[in-house]
Amino acid sequence: MWYKRTIPLLIVFTIGVLAFAHNYVPLRISDQFRERLSEWFRIIGGFALFLGAYSLLHMHVSRIRKQQPGWAYSVFVFVGAAGMIIVGLLNEGYGPLRSAPVGQPTWYQWGYDYIQKPCQATIFSLLAFFMASAAFRTFRARNTSAALLLASALIVMFGRVAIFQTVSAWFGAQSSFARHADGLFSATTDAIMEYPNLAATRAILLGISLGAISQSLRILFGIERSYLGGGD
Amino acid sequence: MAAPRADIKRIAVTRHIIYALLTVAIIVPMLRPTPCSFQPTPNSRRFHERIEQLPAGSEVLLSFDYSPDAKAELYPMSVTLLEQCFERGLIPVVMTHWPEGVRLAEQACHDVAKKYGKESGKDYVLLGFKPGGGNLLLNMGENFKSAFPEDYYHQPTATMAALKGVKTLRDIDLAVDLAAGPTVDMWVVYGSDRYGFPLAAGTTAVAAPKCYPYLQSGQLKGLLGGMRGAADYEQLVVKGVGPAGKLMLPQTVAHLLLIVLLVLANGRFTLARLRGKEGT
């Protein structure tokens, strides 16, 4: 079907080639084209928010309809979303297109400050507990690579805080040994970050970039078509 | 094969003991705070010096690219950054790529501007959130005011005193990305490399290692990493202990506990290996 396959492929090829080629055209019209293109992309990107919201709500509707385990939590998604949308649109009587005066507390801010902020912070904080428990149960120096990883982890944990000075301060002492030990761990941590970590990160970045370039070319020339749907 | 019942029970008990120990390790130092002394790292010093070198009236673009889950690490950094800008007479231009970051940005700007008696639109600008990511940066690089025709309070940016000298991203004297995610890559690729403005970053501890290649190549002019970076920066700017500095003690005790747990677990594992049976 040409309108489902050929036209989208032509649009992708034309826009892709233009977006790439305009970088090599040193004319004012090229700059204007880039400016217009970036505005279009932003407008199209805005629709992704609607798509994301639709996808989220659709998933939770089907959970409630099928009464899957934990379906009651999905009700909270709707309660939360509806609550924030309503107070956001009402905006203390100023409406969605005007701002409430600077510094005036609003219900939208209240919902963010006293519900969203503590909830998100709490969920993220739980990671510390899971990580501590998982590290204790599974992080073992079973071979040379694991031993090296363990040693690096311990050095970085020492180096990112001042353990020796803190412990000596508990005993009311200001030891120069503690200061030097913390300084040594801090410098070793920086060295780990600046050499082995940097080398590995750069290799990963290069790999990702090469992969992105090859994937972009595949999409541009119509070899990769899975984004069109239909399974091929 | 399913794990024996006794093993499952032992793992559950161990897990709960670790949770209890970690809770105590975090809460007790918070209840009995004692100042934690440490020297700022060279990266934190470089970040601070970079801002100190800017002449008064320079435009500093701050991107609050984080949500409340990274607030403990990045919010103190953001507040200190605004304080340094206002102290030195710089003009912070604040934006975010994350919708959840708007309120945090608004709160930080409002509180710090009130402390220093600064006025929105004249001494600083809060642009708020716009979708688009890299495309937004390209748009800002071509025409800053078409990307943000209004600020967060619906005031037109075209006539705004604080943005008088800013036509494109090229007119920004320094940009700082306060990032909990992958936005530093985006700022480097679509922002600083393309339009040639200096860029620095403040990130969560977990995101910092990924920024080191940019730091070494000079694409990042400074880096603050995690709570330690925030605490270092506070020491350099406010010459004392701030909110991040106070949180360094619970973090220190939690690290100490984790180190002890790892040493114990590996000691037990090594002993079991030496005796000829695989430990857990």
Image: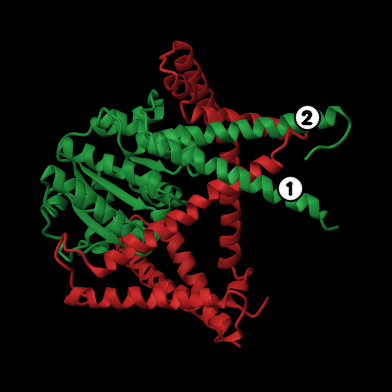
Chain colours: A red, B green
Residue shown at 86%/57% (left/top)? B1
Instruction: In this rendered view, identify the residue nearer to me: A166 or B45.
Output: A166
| Quadrant of residue A132 within the rendered picture | top right
The residue wearing badge 2 is B270
Q: Residue at left 58%, top 67%? A: A219
Mark 2 belongs to which subunit?
Answer: B
* Chain to which mark 1 belongs: B
Q: Quadrant of residue B34?
A: top left
x 48%, y 65%: residue: A17
Instruction: Look at label 2 and name its amino acid.
Output: Thr
Q: Is residue B70 above or below residue B159?
A: above
The tag on residue A129 is none
Which residue sits furthest top?
Answer: A176
> The N terminus of chain A lies in which quarter of the figure?
bottom right
Q: Which residue is mark 1?
A: B10
Q: Give, as a three-letter code, the residue at label 1.
A: Arg
Residue A157 visible, this orientation: yes
Observer able to see residue B221: no
Residue A24 x, y percent position in the rendering? 41, 55
The image shows residue B24 at horizontal and vertical percentages of: 50, 40
Q: Are marks 2 and 1 in contact (CB under 8 Å)?
A: no
